[in-house]
Amino acid sequence: MLGKLEPLVSVIIPVYNTGKFLEKCLKSAIEQTYRNLELIVVDDGSTDNSLEIIKQFERADSRIKVIRHEQNRGLFQARLTGADQAKGDFIAFLDSDDFLASDTYRRMVKAALTENADMVETNFVLVNEKDEYFVHSLNRVSAKRLEGEEIRKAYFGQRGLAYHWYVIWNKLYRKELWEKCRPFYNAIDQHLVMTEDFAFSTVLYCNARKYVS
C-alpha cells in the first residue's frame, strides 16, 4: 500500500474520432487500482460519437474532466491543453486508442516515490486487429535506473530506433519536471504529424534528474 496521502496523478487523454476504442480506454483508466486520479479528457474536435461516449463516462465518474476544442488542433496541442489544467503531483498521458493494465499507475507511483525519480517508464504490449498481444525486442525496456547525463546518453544513443524511449504515453512525470519543460513547447504552434512524441520527449529527457523503469 502507498499510504493515506497518495499523490494525485493527472491523466491526460486526447481524443480525436476514436469512438471505436474509446470505451475500452476510459474503462481501463477508471478501473485502475490506484484511485487518486484526475482524468482530463480533451476532445480535439471529434466528428464521430467520441464526445457522446466521453460525456457518458463523465456523468458516471466525478474524476473525469472534459475539455473540448471546437476545431481539430492536433495531438500535440491537445496534450498541452490537458496538461495545462492538471492539478496532480504527477502527469501521465494515455492515447485514446490504448488501454491500461489495471495496476499500472499504482506501480508507477510506487516506483517514483521509492526511487525519488521524476520520470518512470513501464513496458507495454502491442495488440493487433486479431487481438493478439506481442512485445517487439526494440520496445522492451532495458535500463532500470539512470541519473543525470546517463539519461541523455541513453536517449540519444538509441537514435530513435527503440520506440519505447520517445513515446510519452508509457511514462509518469513529476509535475515539477513537466513545468520546467513546458515553456519550450510554446515554440511549436503548428499541427504536428508523427513527430509530437519526439518534440515532447527530447525536452523531458534533457531536463530529467532521475529515470527508473
Image (cartoon, rainbow, N blue to C red):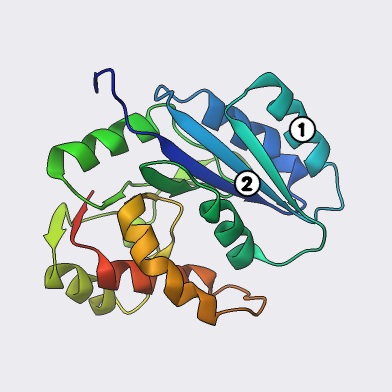
Name the residue carrying label 1.
Answer: 55
Task: Give the structural element (helix, strand or loop) at label 2.
Answer: loop
Left or right: residue 169 compared with residue 98: left
Left or right: residue 180 compared with residue 185: left
**Camera-nearest residue between 64 and 154:** 64
Amino acid residing under circle 1: Lys
Image location of residue 207, percent across then percent down: 26, 69
Name the residue carrying label 2.
Answer: 96
82 vs 65: above or below: below
Residue 42 seen in render: yes
Q: Quadrant of residue 190?
A: bottom right
Identify the residue at image location x=69%, y=20%.
Answer: 60
Identify the residue at image location x=46%, y=42%.
Answer: 87
Amino acid residing under circle 2: Ser
Q: Residue 157: which numbered mark, if any?
A: none
**Camera-nearest residue between 19 and 138:** 19
Crowding around mark 1 (Cα neighbors within 10 Å: few <14, some 14 to 19, many 20+) is some
139 vs 10: above or below: below
Residue 164 seen in render: no
Left or right: residue 118 compared with residue 173: left
112 vs 102: above or below: below
Identify the residue at image location x=62%, y=65%.
Answer: 77
> Mark 2 or mark 1, which is nearer the start of the sequence?
1
What is the CA distance from the residue labelled 1 to the residue labelled 2? 15 Å
Quadrant of the snapshot with the N terminus: top left
Crowding around mark 2 (Cα neighbors within 10 Å: few <14, some 14 to 19, many 20+) is many
How many discs appear? 2
Image location of residue 76, percent across then percent down: 59, 66
Image location of residue 84, percent across then percent down: 53, 55
Task: Give the structural element (helix, strand or loop) at label 1.
Answer: helix
